[in-house]
Amino acid sequence: MLDITSPANPRVKELVALRRRRNRSDRTLVEGREELALALSAGVRPLSLYHCPDLATDDGLVGRVRALGAEVVTLSRAAFDRVAYRESPDGWLAVVPAVETRLDRLALPPDPLLIVCEGLEKPGNLGAILRTADAAGVAAVLSADQVTDWGNPNLVRASKGTVFSVPVAAGSTAEVLDWLAARSVRVVATTPDTDTLVTGVDLTGAVAVAVGSEKHGLSDRFRAAAQVRARIPMFGRADSLNAATSAAIVVYESVRQRLSAAPAPPPA
């Protein structure tokens, strides 16, 4: 096992460089025991693990990662503080293969529920949407005209590792719309510019819930291509909700409808 004590070590500098998008085309960082454990349970095979014994006691995770063929490196507290991107690091950091994001490799179940995020900038919003998708059983989350890449370490953190458990993909708005149309998926555009409430829209069957950036909302092209435009009931002075909140409200309305439409279980 390699032991690194100096914050100036070249390996430490390599890890810091992975925070920048241009350096992580084929790999990314996962920091935090909870996030790493979820990634492992989703089938991720780390390339390397960096563990700080001064911050975390190994409860078997090191052996579990080593058994997958990953290199294990021990870092001093000073070295780990240099590579950590969380405010309160817990002593676990792994380098893992980049998330697969090709549209053409996604396989959908019957009557899938999807989320499309167009032009979202904040990693925290995308991470929160992934947590909703994981909890609600969403088939995939698509990023149209992507601004923040799926391997952004802050997105991985905000998603609590669910970026590895929920299928994701990215493409231009045109590519995403063509992909949805080819699979007969109805697009429901969330927008305040309609009288149709989301509670009055059929969200069963093959549906993609589309949300846009908080500043600009969905593009004219996306709204024009949508089969339905729907708004969330709002009674305050603000005219919009956080993108992740909007996605969660509409997704769980779809979940409610799907559960209501499901056949009742046979009597015991």
Image (tube, rainbow, N blue to C red):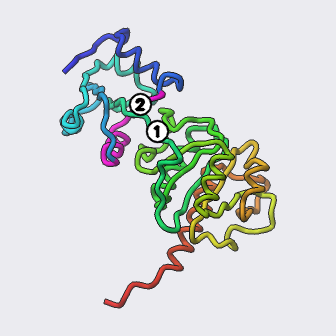
Q: Which residue is mark 2?
A: 29
Q: Earlier in the sequence, mark 2 or mark 1?
A: 2
Q: Is residue 162 left or right of residue 112?
A: left
Label 2: which secondary element: strand
Query: As rendered, which of 113 and 129 lies closer to the eye?
Result: 113
Relative image position of residue 128 (x, y in whole percent) = 53, 47
Category of crowding for the residue at label 2, using alpha-carbon neighbours closer than 10 angstroms: few (below 14), some (14–19), many (at least 20)? many
Residue 60 shown in magenta: no
Category of crowding for the residue at label 1, using alpha-carbon neighbours closer than 10 angstroms: few (below 14), some (14–19), many (at least 20)? many
Res 72 quadrant in image: top left
Label 1: which secondary element: helix
Query: As rendered, which of 43 and 6 lies closer to the eye?
Result: 43
The residue at 80%/63% (across/down) is 194
Which mark identifies residue 156? Answer: 1
Relative image position of residue 153 (x, y in whole percent) = 47, 32
The residue at 54%/62% (across/down) is 113
Q: Is residue 29 left or right of residue 232?
A: left
Is residue 188 depicted above or below 19 in this figure?
Answer: below
Res 34 quadrant in image: top left
Question: Which image quarter holds the C terminus?
Answer: bottom left
Residue most extreme to the bottom:
267
Query: Which residue type carries mark 2?
Result: Leu
Q: Is residue 131 left or right of residue 39?
A: right
Q: Which residues are magenta?
A: 25-42
Query: Which residue type carries mark 1?
Result: Val
Is residue 191 depicted above or below 255 in this figure?
Answer: above
Is residue 166 depicted above or below 265 in this figure?
Answer: above
Relative image position of residue 104 (x, y in whole percent) = 51, 48
Label 2 to label 1: alpha-carbon separation: 8 Å
